[in-house]
Amino acid sequence: MNMFMAIYCAILFFVLSPGILFKLPKNGSKFVVAGVHAVIFGVVSFFTCKFVWNLSHKVALPAKKEGLKEKTREGLLENPPIVQVTKPQLAQ
């Protein structure tokens, strides 16, 4: 999980907490209200997390991975295999 996703989840959790934007159901007990808001948080995060994840990768700077080299087609062809595989010859 990257930092943008953590911040998004924290803000979403705060905004969907009972009494911040709304309280459903109005006359419910403390546990029923918390349960309804937990379900709302789960549904909203399920449908929006992929969008926020993709957005965070477009906005964020690309991270470098130390010690790993990118494999390119040319890089793979520079080091030919030691043993070459040939097609088996059929007996005539």
Image: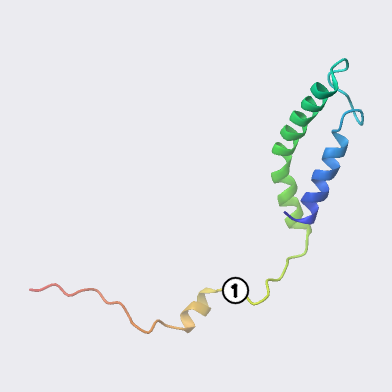
Which residue is pictured at 10% across the width and 74% down the height?
A: 91
User: From what the image shows, is residue 85 above or below residue 37?
Assistant: below
**Side (left or right) of 88 relative to 47:** left
User: From what the image shows, is residue 90 above or below residue 18?
Assistant: below
Amino acid type for the residue under numbered disc 1:
Glu
User: From what the image shows, is residue 28 above or below residue 65?
Assistant: above
- The quarter of the picture where the C terminus appears is bottom left
Splitting the image into 4 quarters, where does residue 30 fall?
Answer: top right
Q: Residue furthest top?
A: 27
Q: Position of residue 33 (x, y in %)?
A: 83, 23
Circle 1 — which element?
Answer: loop
Which residue is pictured at 90% across the width and 30% down the height?
A: 21
The residue carrying mark 1 is 70
The one of 64 and 88 positioned closer to us in this rendering: 64
Packing grade of label 1 (10 A; few <14, some 14-19, many >=20) is: few
Which residue is pictured at 83% across the width and 44% down the height?
A: 10
Q: Position of residue 1 (x, y in %)?
A: 72, 54
Q: Position of residue 72 (x, y in %)?
A: 55, 74
- Colour mapping used in the image: rainbow
> Number of callouts in the render?
1
Which residue is pictured at 73% across the width and 56% down the height?
A: 57
The one of 42 and 31 positioned closer to us in this rendering: 31
User: From what the image shows, is residue 50 above or below residue 86?
Assistant: above
Splitting the image into 4 quarters, where does residue 88 fall?
Answer: bottom left
Q: Position of residue 55 (x, y in %)?
A: 75, 51
Q: Residue furthest right?
A: 20
